[in-house]
Amino acid sequence: MIRVLSGLTTGLTFSVCLLATSLVFGQQYPGMSASGYAGGAGYAPSQYYGQQMPQQAYGGHSGYMGQPGGTPAYMASPAQLMQGFGGEQVGPASFRRKAGQRVASRFAPAPRPGGMAQTPRWFDIAVDAVFLTRDGGDGAGVLSTEGIAGQPVLSTADGAFSTEAGMRFVASIPLNSGKVLEFGYMGLFDHSASETVTSNGNLFSVLSDFGTAPFGGYGETGQANEHSLSYRTGMDTVELGFRRRWIDPNDRWQGSWLAGVRHFYLTEEFGFNSVSNNGFLDYDSSTVNALTGFQMGADLWLAASNGLDIGFFGKVGVYGNRIKQNSRYLATSINPAVETDMDDERASFVLEAGVMANWRVNQNLAVRAGYQVLLLDGVALASDQFSENPPFLQPSSSSVLVDDGELIYTGFNVGVEWMW
């Protein structure tokens, strides 16, 4: 948790420095108003949308109808009803709506000659490269010692995971009045770690309580020459939500709230190996966590006058977690292998938070960067399934599914966003 707080502090400090620089040295784009954009139109950072265009008597266009209750000043043809006044497209059939129901975009161009409407925004698409480090939380356990009940030399926390690259994709469809339908995916992460310790017949494992029960350990794992571990984990998540945006009258502060569903798919594989003069032992375990549930979130953005926007976001959710676990022991004295499979269900908790900075390159393109923390609590980690109960005794002790693990991802992201 100290690592998480430290990371968030770093991200917040970075964001404040960017904002201060932008407010002091930022210059407005040519033709921008004092609020920093052409015509002072309502802004939403990146895929964010601002104020609603004024509702008119018919389809959002003045000139369709006369005074209220009067005779129509102009009767539109069926083709014009499908296209909108002045040739403006109403949109795909599945999302067709009146032009006056669209929300204004900060990046909308100036009105066309002759008073024709601005080009509508139909989609926002963002693609990020995400660099995350995996942390298994406080569930580390000692696996081996040098000497009987001696100094620990190998634990499940060893073989630190390196920072791995994944990707994030976000697509937004504006509806009306600041409402947005949002789809997101983040994943393709494949973290792996390994560690090996060697000694001249002086390694003892947790299976014999480090050489004390029985004294001197078991033949395959006590008085061993080599102990090693391997660990691999993958994570993918997909979400679908409804977002409602708002903007203050000065177009400076803006934000949104979010509600929707989300699914996580977390897979892990853990292995422990021992080699001694008396034989060998191979242990492997794998877990699958499939989390599905409801989440809520919010964000807050501050827009500077030079195209830089600083934002903070958070999401929290409770999920139903369906867990599958498999364990397998193979040793010189255990052949064929002893294998167990277990299933379980439980409630899990997920928290995601971070900071973001967007820089507007032009009316369609923005570059973005940020820092984020993702916490999953109540998951089955493969390393936690390594039981202290020795498999050499008959009858063998029953296996127990451990599903109270905690997993933390922290890291940076950088990407682009295209608005059309």
Image (cartoon, helix red, strand yellow):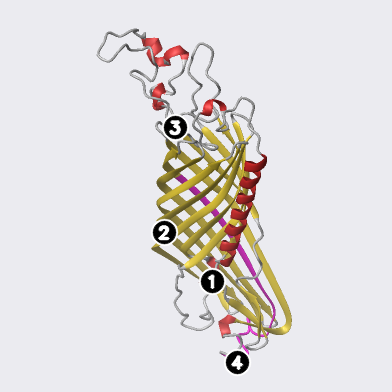
Q: Is residue 15 above or below residue 419?
A: below
Q: Residue at x 70, y 82 (%)?
A: 277
Quadrant in which the N terminus is drawn: bottom right
Task: Give the residue type at disc 4.
Answer: Phe
Question: Which one is closest to the eye, mark 2 or mark 3?
Answer: 3
User: Does the rendering let one see residue 28?
Assistant: yes
Q: Which mark is residue 322?
A: 2
Left or right of residue 177: residue 202? right
Separation of marks 1 and 3 at Cα, in angstroms: 48 Å
Q: CA distance from mark 2 to mark 3?
A: 42 Å
- For marks 1 and 3, the one nearer the N-term is 3
Q: From the image, state whether disc 2 or disc 4 is nearer to you.
A: 2
Q: Position of residue 264 (x, y in %)?
A: 48, 53
Q: What whole-number distance in Å separates the C-alpha atoms at marks 1 and 4? A: 27 Å
In the picture, residue 321 is in which quadrant? bottom left
Between 401 and 22, the residue placed more toward the observer is: 22
Magenta stretch holds residue 231: yes
Query: How many other residues sit within 10 Å of disc 3, few (<14), some (14-19) or many (≥20)?
Result: many
Horizontal arrangement in the rendering, residue 88 relative to residue 30 (left or right): left
